[in-house]
Image (cartoon, rainbow, N blue to C red):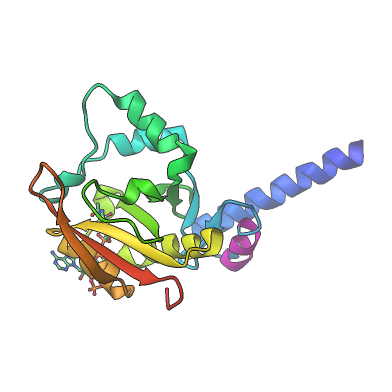
Amino acid sequence: MLSIVVAATFTLFAFTTLFVLTCASGANARLFLFLINRVPSMSVSNDNYWIKPLEERHAWDILGWEYPFPYDFYNPSSDDHQEHYVGQFLNPELKFHAVLDSCGTMVGFCSFGSDGQVSGGDYSDEALDIGVGMRPELTGQGKGAAFFGAILDHALGTLNPEFLRLTVAKFNLRALKLYENFGFELKDEFSEQPSAVRYRILVRAAAGPV
Ligand SMILES: CC(C)(COP(=O)(O)OP(=O)(O)OC[C@H]1O[C@@H](n2cnc3c(N)ncnc32)[C@H](O)[C@@H]1OP(=O)(O)O)[C@@H](O)C(=O)NCCC(=O)NCCS
């Protein structure tokens, strides 16, 4: 019994030390990433972003985010249905995930499935819909490729889709440029009814460079 306790304590100590070293200096990153990638439902990219199922505290954090114009379009509603929105973030069918940096700070989130669709679009073809949102204060600093690359890595590694699909507001040239850089191509354009916002549906095959 004593030996089990000693072994467990040592293992916990070793993981904690490894985590602290990785966080503080970037040392041992490869070993750390290797170990974390063994945990089912979690993945870590080479850029040290972890993707893991979203938790309630993440949902409440996101509900407080505010983007500057014109991206305030993506601001979460501040009405009195916050509990409902948290429930949506935690709905397993929508596959919301938190994107964390190597110290566990949430840098953004993503969803895999129907939450990435917008009413009025044609989604009759089979494809995995991806939704993404980066923490507002991190946007516009050239971090998009690493962030989105980690999300794609996770989608391809855990969900095995044949095609990937994104629905993007047409005014959002920054997101469109990012997705175009990853090989996504225009499939369709439509307006959400009754609003006049135009959206683009972009698609790419799963096979190809991430
Ligand atoms: C979309 C998002 C992930 C992009 O990440 P980011 O770190 O802000 O983007 P970057 O700064 O890396 O810019 C991405 C690309 O857009 C380009 N870009 C930036 N602003 C641009 C603009 N106004 N017009 C055209 N291109 C622009 C950048 O130069 C870069 O392209 P490059 O790598 O070829 O130079 C992030 O902004 C986000 O989540 N925003 C909040 C909500 C949102 O837009 N969600 C997407 C819904 S589909």
Which sits in the foreground, 113 or 209?
113
Q: Which residues are magenta?
A: 29-36
> What's the residue at 35%, 45% (across, down)?
115
| Ligand 1 rendered quadrant | bottom left
x and y, in percent, of residue 124 in the image: 34, 57
Is any part of residue 107 visible from this angle? no
Of all residues shown, which one is farthest toward the top? 80
Query: Magenta stretch: dominant SS?
Result: helix
Q: Is residue 118 left or right of residue 93?
A: left
> What's the residue at 35%, 26% (across, down)?
84
Q: Is residue 138 left or right of residue 52?
A: left
Q: Total number of numbered labels?
A: 0
x and y, in percent, of residue 180 in the image: 26, 72
> What's the residue at 15%, 45% (across, down)?
72
Residue 202, placed above or below residue 64: below
Of all residues shown, which one is farthest toward the left? 196
Q: Quadrant of residue 148?
A: bottom left
**111 within the magenta span:** no
Q: Is residue 44 left or right of residue 96?
A: right
Q: Quadrant of residue 175?
A: bottom left
x and y, in percent, of residue 166 in the image: 30, 60
x and y, in percent, of residue 113 in the image: 41, 50
Residue 62, placed above or below residue 104: above
Q: Is residue 131 left or right of residue 66?
A: right
Is any part of residue 30 visible from this angle? yes
Quadrant containing the C terminus in the rendered view = bottom left
Of all residues shown, which one is farthest toward the bottom? 208
Quadrant containing the N terminus in the rendered view = top right
Q: Quadrant of residue 22?
A: bottom right
Residue 149, placed above or below residue 64: below
